[in-house]
């Protein structure tokens, strides 16, 4: 289990095809908190070997700023990890089709790579993607596995396996989302990462579905186009008004405790108990001030 640090946790993870060195070079300026150099779905099978080489070369001199992650292939875990440059530039590995056995193998191979690179043990984190019924049932074990920083839900693969036919807002998958939110909270790791929005040109849909993920307990989302990043960052960043209200709640509770009054009330007269205070602390913990992201209309095609 990895201890959560919400103030520095990525809100946005932008996928970048591992077979496109030009896109990797320009991705750092797209505003995403984390970049995922993808060796899996974004790369056709004939190009995967070349993509490993491109990613290895890029990571050796990756610029500072965003976090750099690599999504490997579950079917070629050993080859992919062997070809990834495990060094200070690499924040973590994204493991698709995650299950306890794959996570244990990944931990062993990363441990060997860290030792060879002179890195502290388990400094490379893992974002585990739950994409199967087996993985979903094992969510409590996945969220407590070594290195797991947070988890995500691969809804397309999961829906296909379960025979679901999701509607426009994917209500059929909401109970499954709740399962990984609960598992993450119980394990004490970061809240999970929401799935991508594939309708890349539908701005209103992106805003709506990302706001829904916030309400459902997610605190980050993956993106497949740079135009999506600013919306995602904004949704998962509390507004100045929300932060001010949360700080007011905590100040009122602290003042009541100093007076030994025993009871604290919000500005509109609601009782402040520990649950209210805990929610307020969570909001304050995610405060970043200005996001520093670029508006979608200012971004070029990736």
Image (cartoon, helix red, strand yellow):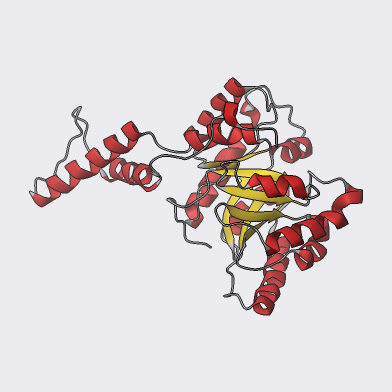
Task: Give the residue displayed 61% in from the left and 59% down from the top.
Answer: 141
x and y percentages locating residue 87 in the rendered image: 64, 68
Task: Give the residue displayed 60% in from the left and 44% down from the top.
Answer: 29
x and y percentages locating residue 12 in the rendered image: 57, 42
Please state which of residues 17 and 113 is positioned toward the viewer in this rendering: 17
Q: Quadrant of residue 14?
A: top right
Decide: is 47 above or below 249.
below
Task: Give the residue displayed 65% in from the left and 55% down from the top.
Answer: 69
Task: Give the residue displayed 79% in from the left and 44% down from the top.
Answer: 41
Q: Residue furthest right?
A: 46
x and y percentages locating residue 242 in the rendered image: 34, 34
Residue 285 visible to the viewer: yes
Quadrant where the C terminus sits is top right
| 180 sits to left or right of 156 | left
Decide: is 263 above or below 206.
below
Please state which of residues 184 and 175 is positioned toward the viewer in this rendering: 184
């Amino acid at each position: 289990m990895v201890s959560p640090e919400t103030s520095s946790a990525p809100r946005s993870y932008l996928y970048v095809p591992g077979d496109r060195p030009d896109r990797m070079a320009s991705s750092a300026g797209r505003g995403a908190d984390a970049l995922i150099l993808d060796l899996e779905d974004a790369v056709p099978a004939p190009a995967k070997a070349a993509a490993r080489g491109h990613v290895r070369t890029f990571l050796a001199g990756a610029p500072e700023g965003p976090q750099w992650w690599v999504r490997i292939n579950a079917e070629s875990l050993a080859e992919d990890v062997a070809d990834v440059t495990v060094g200070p530039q690499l924040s973590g590995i994204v493991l698709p089709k995650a299950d306890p056995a794959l996570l244990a193998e990944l931990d062993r191979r990363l441990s060997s790579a860290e030792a060879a690179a002179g890195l502290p043990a388990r400094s490379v984190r893992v974002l585990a993607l739950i994409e199967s019924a087996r993985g979903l049932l094992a969510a409590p074990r996945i969220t407590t596995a070594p290195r797991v920083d947070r988890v995500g839900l691969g809804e397309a693969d999961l829906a296909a396996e379960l025979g679901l036919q999701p509607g426009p807002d994917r209500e059929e998958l909401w109970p499954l989302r709740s399962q990984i939110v609960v598992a993450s909270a119980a394990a004490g790791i970061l809240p999970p990462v929401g799935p991508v929005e594939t309708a890349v040109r539908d701005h209103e849909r992106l805003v709506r579905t990302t706001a829904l993920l916030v309400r459902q307990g997610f605190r980050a989302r993956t993106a497949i186009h740079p135009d999506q990043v600013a919306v995602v960052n904004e949704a998962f960043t509390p507004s100045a008004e929300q932060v001010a209200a949360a700080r007011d709640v905590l100040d009122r509770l602290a003042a009541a405790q100093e007076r030994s009054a025993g009871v604290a009330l919000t500005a509109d007269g609601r009782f402040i108990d520990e649950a209210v205070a805990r929610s307020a602390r969570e909001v304050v913990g995610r405060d970043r001030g200005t996001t520093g992201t670029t508006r979608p209309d200012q971004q070029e095609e990736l």
